[in-house]
Amino acid sequence: MLRALTRAILLAVLPAALLQGCQSAFGPESLQRTHPAYNAAITASVNEQMLQNLVRLRYRDVPFFLEIGSVTASLSVGASADLGASVAIGGEDSLSPRAGVAYVDAPTISYVPLRGENLLKSLLSPLKLESILVLTQSGWQISRVFGLCFERINDVRNAPTASGPTPDKEPDYRSFSRLLDSLNRLQTQGQIEVGAQEAGIVVKLNADGDHAAHGLDEVRALLGIETEDNQFSLNTNFLKAADNQWTVRTRSLSSLLYYLSQNVDTPPTHQSAGLVTVTEAEDGGVFDWGDTPAGRLFQVKTGLERPQGAYIATFYRGHWFWIEDNDLQSKSTFMLLRQLFDLQAGQSTVQGPTLTLPVGR
């Protein structure tokens, strides 16, 4: 009799428990629970990898990129039921049926190393003018795009020695900073346009109003342009420079990463130990990389304690390195770097083994 009663109770309770568990473990609720979590985790992981590679370059360590090839999540559900009984001498016996449902989320992530000839060519090849055009037409400030992507315009140089490991001496950049300030004022006034024509990429500077005319004169003077033209095509061939052209040299993705890495703060103990290069200023002091075009747009801080509320943080060589969450300039520059990396190297053919790891709970 007791066995039959137990079976009846379990048959009544178990389907309801299974149905309730399946409804919560699978279907739309499962998607709502897992998709945002995976999205946030992958974004944070990729951002931290980029930041750590910038820190590695500051220390002249080798950077390395892993791409997440796939994320596979499998859900399984199981049910359990038992019956507790108590016998009271001289009283009433009692039965306590218990049922439960458990689900297991078992994600598997595949990592693919980015390496090989195609990636190397992507990293070392100059950024394409078409990519720079796309960025300027997508809402990015011209001063930010030009300040990071151009190493030189005519004879005005944007810290070319910073395109590799940290130099010993202060780079040449001050005239380029003044050029960016002039272009930024013209863009604020709506007096500059960048577009594509049959001749290629064209920069058009309008001269409506005294301020705009003065800004155009500043640009001409800095670039050594004597013509009265206000429309200039971008040319990458320094052997065929012309007055109505801006002859430019774009940075490669590798040189851009190096340029930004100069703005990674390092602990004084690491500097005194010779782990990083300390650049000497023209006056003999320590050069402030924050004064360069990249330094005005990007800064990575360091400390022994894990930062609270940082936008991105990574632990390397016993110290924390991070970008402040309220540092909107650095966050914007980091976002631009990610877009440039995807444009230049994101489509490279991946070579090498795939590492597949089950993620523990």
Image (cartoon, rainbow, N blue to C red):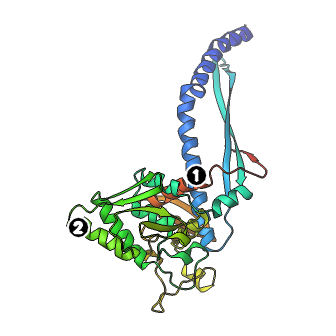
- On the image, numbered disc 2 is attached to which residue? 211
Answer above or below: position of 339 versus 303.
above
Q: Please name whichever residue, 148 or 109, is drawn nearer the observer in this view of the structure.
A: 148
**Residue 206, position as x, y percentages in the image:** 29, 60
Q: Residue furthest right?
A: 353
Screen quadrant of the N terminus: top right
**Alpha-carbon neighbours of circle 1 within 10 Å: few (<14), some, or many (≥20)?**
few
* Gap in angstroms between the C-alphas marked 2 and 1: 38 Å
Relative placement, left or right, of 291 versus 36 is left
**Disc number for residue 342:** 1
Q: Residue at x 20, y 63 (%)?
A: 209
Question: As displayed, is residue 271 above or below residue 314?
Answer: below
Q: Quadrant of residue 95?
A: top right
Front residue (pair 238, 3): 238
Badge 1 marks a residue whose secondary structure is: helix
Decide if residue 337 is in sight here: yes
Write the residue at 47% across / 60% down. 333
Comparing 182 with 111, the one in front is 182
